[in-house]
Image: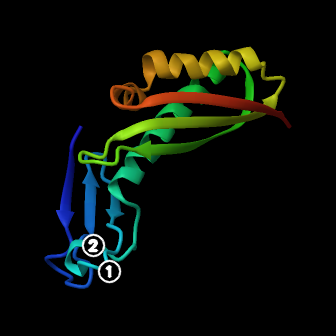
């Protein structure tokens, strides 16, 4: 896996902390820092997600992917899956994630709660590399609900 991240501040002095990432799969995404009124050269312009937000979003995507795939392989009629993540970070550098809560909402027809609980556990115990990695510094908790459609 590869990714190249380029600083856009060298090209555009208005966004001193903007970056463009080019992934090995040929996709691009933009990152930016939060504005810093006290030190404008150290901040961004709030034009894109922060890198740590993308890390959290990537973790949510990784685990949601697993949950859907596990449920589909179990021949469950899953119609939707979302996960809302909330995290807290350390107050001092490095400001790693210290707690992460993931709340899953799975929609479908006749999807048993036990199957959803098992899929989430399998993702976190075995398949989701991102949450396993973040679990080294953060206490990860999960909750879920199943909605019939």
Residue positioned 42% across, 30% down in the render = 131
Camera-nearest label, 1 or 2: 1
> Which residue is the extreme one toward the left?
10
Horizontal arrangement in the rendering, residue 130 relative to residue 149 (left or right) = left
Horizontal arrangement in the rendering, residue 130 relative to residue 1 (left or right) = right
Quadrant position of the C terminus in the picture: top right
Counting residues from the start of the chain, the first of labels 1 and 2 encountered is 1
Q: CA distance from mark 1 to mark 2?
A: 8 Å
Residue positioned 34% across, 48% down in the render = 91
Residue 52 coordinates in the image, percent (x, y):
36, 51
Q: Which mark is residue 43?
A: 2
Residue positioned 40% across, 67% down in the render = 48
Tag 2 secondary structure: loop
Q: Which mark is residue 37?
A: 1
Quadrant position of the N terminus in the picture: top left
Residue positioned 33% across, 26% down in the render = 136
Dividing the picture into quadrants, the one containing residue 114 is top right
């Amino acid at each position: 896996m590869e990714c190249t991240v380029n600083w856009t501040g060298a090209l555009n002095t208005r966004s001193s902390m903007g970056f463009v990432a080019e992934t090995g799969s040929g996709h691009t995404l933009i990152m930016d820092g939060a504005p810093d009124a006290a030190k404008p050269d150290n901040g961004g312009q709030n034009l894109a997600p922060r890198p740590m937000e993308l890390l959290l979003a990537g973790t949510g995507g990784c685990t949601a992917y697993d949950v859907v795939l596990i449920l589909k392989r179990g021949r469950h009629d899953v119609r939707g899956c979302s996960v809302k993540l909330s995290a807290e970070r350390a107050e001092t550098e490095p400001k790693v994630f210290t707690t992460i809560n993931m709340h899953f909402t799975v929609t479908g027809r006749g999807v048993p709660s036990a199957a959803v609980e098992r899929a989430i556990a399998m993702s976190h115990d075995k398949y989701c590399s991102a949450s396993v990695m973040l679990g080294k510094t953060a206490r990860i908790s999960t909750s879920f609900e199943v909605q019939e459609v």
